[in-house]
Image (tube, rainbow, N blue to C red):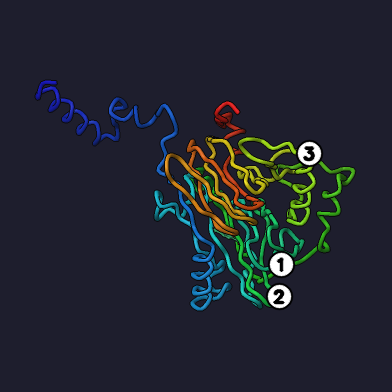
Amino acid sequence: MPADTTTARQDFYDRIGRQNMTPLWTSLADLVTPEPRSACRPASWRFADIRAAMIEAGGLISAKEAERRVLVLENPGLRGQSKVTTDMYAGVQMVLPGEVAPAHRHTQSALRFVLEGGGAHTSVNGERTIMHEGDFIITPPMTWHDHGNESDSPIFWLDGLDIPVVQFLDASFAEHLGEDEQPISRPIGDSDARFGANLVPVDYRPGATSPMFNYPYARTREALERMRRADAWDPCHGLKMRYSNPTNGGHAMTTMGTFVQLLPQGFSTAAYRSTDATVFVPIEGKGRSIIGEDFVVEWGQRDIFVVPSWHRVRHEAAADSVLFSFSDRPIQEALNLFREDRGNV
Ligand code: 1HN
């Protein structure tokens, strides 16, 4: 290209730039890529490291002063943005015996996955539930929620929120109740009684999110154990289940998909990739996962790792293992953007 053309173009770009215009032809190839191209990287955290840092944080600030004492898990490719993937947030929260995390509500949806401890409670929209290891608990948009720990040991859980999605949409609203605890209007176990027995109140009409808010691990684990007898292993997933809204069969929440899978000892999954970047947490077992070309995670119980969009993953279970995971899959499905590649198995 002649030097005068280059100069003329640059001069043009500079002039239109002052009018808030820019040429498409210089950036088109980066805007519309033939495959997902993400700044999100494969990543992993050892629970032992998170736990030690959390105990240290416990000596520096109370749950109440912090409002939520959480260590944010930041994707190494997205530092400074409070993102575990491009559009999802994750953190680990600790509540010490006797502490409370005061009541508030916001438009962001939250999930909790209990990593260690038990006997603490969380209250959501007027109902309290007791948290046990492996329980999956949801906090739908604008539901009041507060946490407290009456047990004699610290409790740790994984928080997953759709913060980057809500941020992108400029749709964040939040309120403090001004009390540590919200008023409780229903007994413990009420939503489980109404919606957890293949029954619904006669005039109930399904809403956007699940009316079940605690999916106890004891029941999840039992279901997986009973299913393994059918010996119907999926080459890519082992035995993988999706947490559902029992009233309409959809995802438990509108923005975050949540899954649990059993990989028996010695099982190696076939390579699989999908467009939903996924956060995994083994709650039982040990093994390793190979992400993309060469990222290897040796994982044990409660470790956390990230598989970015369209990166192949293979899991190898060295012991019977149960993996919880979450992603933005409901959003991608709703927008007809979800894609997966099972490598023909
Ligand atoms: C939140 O409300 C909780 O309620 C945890 O436990 C983490 C991160 C960002 C914004 C709100 C909770 C959060 C959060």
Q: Earlier in the sequence, mark 2 or mark 1?
A: 1
Which residue is at the front of the view, 338 or 322? 322
Question: Around disc 1, counting alpha carbons within 10 Å, would you say few (fewer than 14), some (14 to 19), or many (20 or more)?
Answer: many
Residue under label 3 = 230
Quadrant of residue 143 within the rendered picture: bottom right
- Type of amino acid under label 2: Glu
In the picture shown, does residue 118 fall above or below 247?
A: below
Residue 214 percent location from the top left of the image: 74, 55
Residue at (29%, 31%) from the top-left corner?
Answer: 22
Where does the N terminus fall, quadrant-wise? top left
Residue 150: mark in rendering: 2
Residue under label 1 = 121
Can residue 269 be seen here?
A: yes
Distance between mark 3 and mark 1 Cα atoms? 36 Å
Question: Tag 3, which secondary structure?
Answer: loop
Q: Quadrant of ligand 1?
A: bottom right
Are the residues flagged by discs 2 and 1 in contact, CB closer than 8 Å? yes
